[in-house]
Image: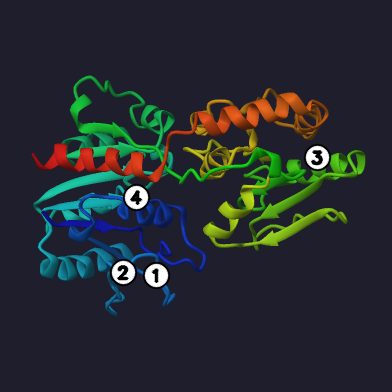
Amino acid sequence: MKISILLPYKENFSPNYAGSISLFISQTVKKSKYLKSIKIFGSTDYKKILLNNYINIKLNSKFYESTSKRFIKNFILKDKKNQSDLLEIHNRPHYIRLLSKYYKNKIILYFHNNPLEMKGSKSLKERIYLLENVDKIVFNSKWSKQKFFTNISNKKYIKNISICYQSSDKPKINFIQKKKIISFVGKLNKSKGYDLFGKAIIQILDKHKEWKGVVFGDEPREDLFFDHSRLKIMGFKDNNFILNYLKKVSISVVCSRWNEPFGRSSLEASSRGSAVIISNKGGLPETCKSAIKLKVLSVKCIYNEIDKLIQNKKNLLKIQKENYTNFNYTHSYISKVIDSIRGSVLK
């Protein structure tokens, strides 16, 4: 069996500014029993790649065709050499119609975002088309699935759908070595709630002199700057660096305003035994069973929840250990889920 995986155009399959979909695919493919049969197709400007079985697609110069059409046509030319039995498309539902003329084998479509906000799945008609023309649709959370089935009964299509969460590894954590550090990981914008975190963390650091704050991420489109002698703004770092750093983080804040379809930051913080504070948005509650959910998304509420954890050391350690113990979404486990989905489609 040969499997082709098609990334969204310009999804960066490289450790240099890697996209979340690329990380998910590279980490699970490594653990897949089909590893040697998988080819990953995408387009990146970086020379370093996450996996060697990656094939870069360069677009031809036909200016009268859309980028998506050119991308699909060039993929088909590449895939003819591969002769895949199964095609997995990630986060681009509008590719399905473009592929219909050229690709006749089995197709799995993965959703990593809200289907109602994506080209090719916004309307009821588009979503029914996908259900009737794709062999399996996989959602990254129950919340994403619920959005897709707005005004559709899923009973008829129950065999066509699956849920597959994102994953992380689960290293051994020494909780005694945890430092008095509070982290924020993600785009530094209002959508991610960075403005709320920034104001809250300044107040926390002013009150608790022995604690520090660290921020990973960037956002050139917004100007949100917070300055404190014990607040480090690390900018963009590769995923391995962040994961290693999270081992010593005690509290992680994921306070998004928008409905996160799932939430990689809270997932990874949980896998490293952090006490995780989240907003009750989208699929975030599905990422961490023992997360503290913000009742109100405000600076005051974020400050209060952090402050309570700092002042109650026993409860802080209890929540840290619960998050770590209950974390099951390892790369190995999720890879088996994906392989099972592949097997069910190819039977």
> How many numbered marks appear?
4
Amino acid at dot 1: Ile
Q: Residue at x 63, y 53 (%)?
A: 245
The residue indicated by pointer 1 is: 49
Q: CA distance from mark 3 to mark 2?
A: 43 Å
Where residue 7 sits, quadrant-wise, is bottom left
Which label number is shown at residue 52?
Answer: 2
Q: Residue at x 29, y 24 (%)?
A: 152
Q: Bin the neighbour count of mark 4 within 10 Å (Cα to Cα): few under 14, some 14-19, many 20 and up.
A: many
C-alpha gap between disc 4 and disc 2: 14 Å
Q: Which image quadrant for residue 278?
A: top right
Quadrant of the drawing holding the C terminus = top left
In what element is the residue under mark 4? helix
Question: Reading the chain from its start, which is encountered first: label 4 or label 2?
Answer: 4
Mark 3: which secondary structure? Answer: helix
Q: Amino acid at mark 3?
A: Ala
Quick check: 298 above or below 224? above
Task: Name the front one of labels 3 and 1.
Answer: 1
Badge 2 amino acid: Asn
Q: Which residue is mark 3?
A: 200
Question: Vertical placement of 128 versus 48: above or below?
Answer: above
**Circle 2 — which element?**
loop
Contact flag, marks 1 and 4 (Cβ < 8 Å): no
Residue ID at (60%, 38%):
273
The answer to which of 195 and 61 lies nearer the viewer is 195
Give how far across and how far down residue 182 sits, in percent: 73, 44
Describe the element under mark 1 as helix, strand or loop: loop
Residue neighbourhood size for the residue with mark 3, other residues' Cα within 10 Å, grouped as few (<14), some (14–19), many (≥20): many
